Amino acid sequence: MTKLFFVAAGGAVGSVMRYALAGWSQKLVPTTFPIGTLVVNVLGCLLIGVLTAVLSGPVLVREEYRIAIMVGVLGGFTTFSTYGWETMALTNDGWYSRACLNVVVTNVLALGAVLIGYRVAQRWVGV
């Protein structure tokens, strides 16, 4: 039961962070392209890469806290369900090239961010 509480609390924090950052990013670059979701997904992937390396190696964290961060905060923060909906909405609106661009750019940057985050953390903490 304690783990569920930590996941729920972390998810609430991550969701609020996602809402704020995605909204701010979208206002900063006003376009029909879902830039706010892209920013959140890439940052979330970078963070999961860093935290996976750090929390699986040199930094000992209680399991409940690790779950709260990795499953709760990052699960609430990243928005791949929103990414799927926005991509479908772009196709429904006839923006096929933007939908394809969203799929390619999001996946390439997000996977690259995981790799970069992991490698940076490895060097940073000596994993």
Image: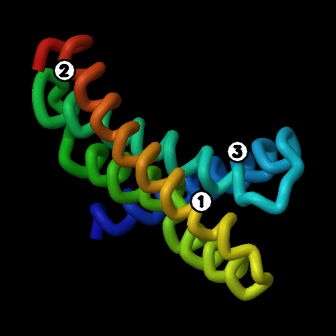
Give the answer, above or below, for where 120 lies relative to 87.
above
Q: Is residue 69 left or right of residue 96?
A: left
Residue 87 at x, y percent in the picture: 62, 73
Name the amino acid, label 3. Leu
Q: Residue furthest bottom?
A: 92
The residue positioned 13% from the left and 22% from the top of the image is 58
Q: Is residue 15 left or right of residue 98?
A: left
Give the answer, above or below, for where 82 lies relative to 62.
below
Q: Earlier in the sequence, mark 3 or mark 2?
A: 3
Q: Which mark is residue 101?
A: 1
Residue 83 at x, y percent in the picture: 57, 67
Residue 49 at x, y percent in the picture: 30, 38
Residue 54 at x, y percent in the picture: 22, 28
- State the image quarter where residue 29 is shown: top right
The residue positioned 88% from the left and 49% from the top of the image is 30
The alpha-carbon separation of the residues under discs 2 and 1 comes to: 31 Å
According to the picture, the residue beneath numbered tag 3 turns out to be 21
Disc 2: CA contacts within 10 A as few (<14), some (14-19) or many (>=20) = some
Asked if the residue at tag 1 contacts the one at tag 2, i.e. Cβ–Cβ closer than 8 Å, the answer is no
Q: Secondary structure at mark 2?
A: helix
Name the amino acid, label 1. Leu
According to the picture, the residue beneath numbered tag 2 turns out to be 122
Name the amino acid, label 2. Gln
Q: Earlier in the sequence, mark 2 or mark 1?
A: 1
